Amino acid sequence: MDQSHTQRLSFSLVYPIALCLVLLVTGCSVSYSTDVDSEQKISDEKGNFNGDLDVEDQFGLALANIGDLEVDGVTDIAVGAPFDDDEGENRGAVWILFMDSDGKVDTHQKISDGSGDFTGDLDDGDQFGRAIAPLGDLNGDGFLDIAVGAPLDDDAGTDKGAVWILFLNGDGTVLSEQKISQDEGDFEGDLDENDRFAHALASIGDLNNDGVTDLAVGVPYDDDGGTDRGAVWILFMNSDGTVQSSQKISSDEGNLDRDLDDEDHFGTAVTEIGDLNGDGVTDLAVGVTGDDDGGPERGAVWILFLNADGTVDSKKRISQNRASFDGQLSDNDRFGGALANLGDINSDGTDDLAVGAKQSDDGGAERGTVWVLFLEIDGEVISSSKISDTEGSFDGDLDSGDQFGAAVAQLGDLDGDDINDLAVGASLDDDGGTDKGALWVLFMDEVDTDHDRLEGGIFSMSQDDLANFLQNPGR
């Protein structure tokens, strides 16, 4: 390696640190933005998907990155269609999509009451597939497993809800399943009728350090403290899919401190957000779609800094009026209805967040929106980017009522350009028939960085400019 190359390499390592020092000296702040580079739609008519969808299936209402199930080097996706009618009305289904790197479907496998070797007992209206979360290889058999929500399951009472743990084979069929409900799976939490346990699901890693992945379960119609305030259950799991122990987070429990209002629907969506504050414990983002900050049902996201026992150490609310969020929300946007950890896409050491607002009216009524939030370690928002029918360089064709942003999932680097990509559900898309549903694979562009002078100007500083500044700071 020649000397000049060594110098360039060394400078590339110190550039971020030096830039931060320059920003302090010159009185500037940093903001980030990102856009869509290209997109691929998957629906009844597009994306090489030849599965049989029916009207009102709402394919795309849940999404999950399930890793490389068939071990071909490409991330695969689980897609919920909770209003599928296999063997009965609205029993629900999950589609396993084996993906190609161009965002199209290679092959697929359906899991429902009549497909995919699933032998669990579903009833009409259960809405199996309303939520999906990857669990890694929970049982240690070499294949990836998933959790699936059925929030209108009636075990022990109407619409109390349930989670199904599906131990998968490499072809996407089900090897075995374990149900978690008021009656099954060793879950000892107290559910009430109409709680809708498992409306949302998220893997949160091994929170209690026992070697088994744990699960966050959203219950947005829980009535602790008031009507439909919502709750989240932290389930400490066993490797057989049963529950070892649990911790509830609500207005009354888990140290949340009664900061919710009636009909907030805390727990509409959940996702892990990494160890945001660096205390060694995974933290959680929770959607609160009924939050009224700034106007009725504009929505909010709560960042919960967790303790290892599942209780809340501290929290931060992101909404129209809080946490330095500069995006403009409208009444009934329901910001926070879908959440995904995007990873550290701006390379500042902190994971960033995708947030769905499926009832946003950008471009037309309820076409929907996804927000990308660049986060600080304390949960404050550095800056944000919007992806919709009118913003973010998204060129897909959305129609009114599509509800783009109904679900979001990070896909990793699907196309091999070293940039994490994103899947977005549009569950009321009408390709092939009314509300059959769709998803969009968004190949994201690299993150842009702007350096804003506090007095209002903008400058961009290259590595050469920074080198000159450091060598001759007075010029």
Image: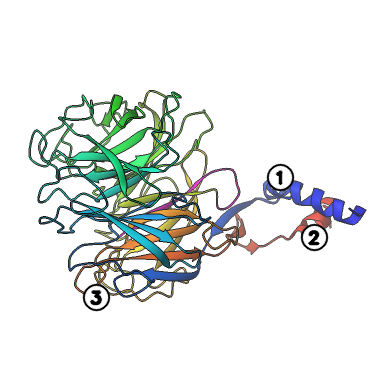
Residue at 58% of width from left, 52% of height from top? Answer: 346
Residue at 40% of width from left, 65% of height from top? Answer: 105
For label 1, the crowd category at 10 Å Cα-Cα, with few meaning under 14, some 14 to 19 and many 20 or more, is few
Give me the disc on residue 464. 2
Which part of the image, by quadrant, shows the C terminus? bottom right
- State the image coordinates of residue 90 (x, y, percent, origin top left): 14, 55
Residue at 47% of width from left, 29% of height from top? Answer: 281
Which three-letter amino acid code belongs to the residue tagged 3? Gly
Q: Is residue 278 left or right of residue 80?
A: right
* Mark 1 or 2, nearer chain start: 1
Name the residue that disc number 3 marks.
Answer: 432
Q: CA distance from mark 2 to mark 3?
A: 54 Å
Task: Find the magenta span and give its range.
Answer: 345-358
Residue at 40% of width from left, 30% of height from top? Answer: 314
Give me the disc on residue 17. 1
- 247 in the magenta segment: no
For label 3, the crowd category at 10 Å Cα-Cα, with few meaning under 14, some 14 to 19 and many 20 or more, is some
Which three-letter amino acid code belongs to the residue tagged 1? Ile
